[in-house]
Image: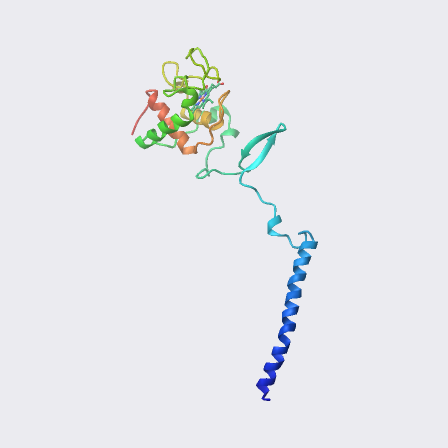
Amino acid sequence: MTELAIRRKRTASLRPLTGGVMLAVALSFGCWEQMDDGKWFPQMKRQPAVQAFEMVTWNDQLEGFTPPAGTVPVGGAGLPDLAAMDIPSQDAVPNPVQPTLESLKNGEKRFGQFCAPCHGPLGMGDGPVAGPSPFAPNNTGPLPVVLPINGPTSMAKVFSDGHLYTTISLGRGRMPSYNRIPPMERWDIVNYLREINGQGVRQ
Ligand code: HEC
């Protein structure tokens, strides 16, 4: 036998042994992981993960799905933290969105989706959800006294842009928060309110 042939033969006879050792090593690692219950080698499947929409309980009741604490909405970096401000500071938040035709059109659309159910199609406080009020005594909906945000007794007319934006963002009194509307589109609604209240400076 040549030297090469001998070497080949030795290597071949070692092959099953090497395979066996590798298999044993692989299996034993697997067992450790199982027996150790993930403490020795933390497993990816058991890592502490923040779920996208965690369930939140408050007052022993399910509060619905809330994004985890610290979640920033898309495009939301650098937005004012309204909840941490006092009312004069909220009222003074400047409107960063120019009242272009595009902004007003989007504001009209969003108003129809989010505000009209209570405040009415023209903002007179007479949407289908609104109940009777001094402003619209013939309302038949379940929520009494929805304030008008247009017309002669408009609440929107007397408040600053920052106040309207904060009302949409945090809610106010019996009005719920509409923070599901993206921040810049809330300003579109503010611009639209200015327009229908005859205070518009359309560009
Ligand atoms: C579920 C019904 C409802 C919806 C929807 C709603 N509102 Fe209201 N809104 C109210 C009620 C009720 C009040 C009176 C709040 C109070 O004083 O208790 C109010 C008050 C207001 C006020 C006066 C705030 C103040 O300081 O007195 C403004 C401005 C306003 N809403 C704007 C809006 C806009 C803009 C939208 C759409 C994004 C909207 N609302 C959607 C029910 C609603």
Q: Can residue 69 be seen in this view?
A: no
Residue at point 37% right, 32% down?
97
Q: Can residue 8 be seen in this view?
A: yes
Please determine whether, in this image, residue 45 is positioned above or below residue 141.
Answer: below
Quarter holding residue 27? bottom right
Please determine whether, in this image, residue 41 is positioned above or below residue 97.
Answer: below
Quarter holding residue 23? bottom right
Quadrant of the drawing holding the C terminus: top left
Instruction: Give the image location of residue 14, x and y in percent.
Output: 64, 76
Q: Left of 128 or right of it: where is 4?
A: right
Using the image as rendered, state which of residue 15 and residue 39 is in the foreground: 15
Instruction: Give the image location of residue 182, x and y in percent.
Output: 43, 34
Instruction: Give the image location of residue 5, x and y in percent.
Output: 58, 85
Q: Left of 101 or right of it: where is 73?
A: right
Quadrant of the drawing holding the N terminus: bottom right
Quarter holding residue 63? top right
Name the residue at the left extreme.
Answer: 203
Residue at point 32% right, 32% down?
102
Name the residue at the bottom extreme.
Answer: 1
Using the image as rendered, state which of residue 147 and residue 136 is in the foreground: 136
Please determine whether, in this image, residue 135 is positioned above or below residue 190.
Answer: above
Q: Give the image quadrant in which the ligand numbered 1 is located.
A: top left
Instruction: Give the image location of residue 146, x and y in percent.
Output: 45, 17
Tell me how the rendering is colored: rainbow
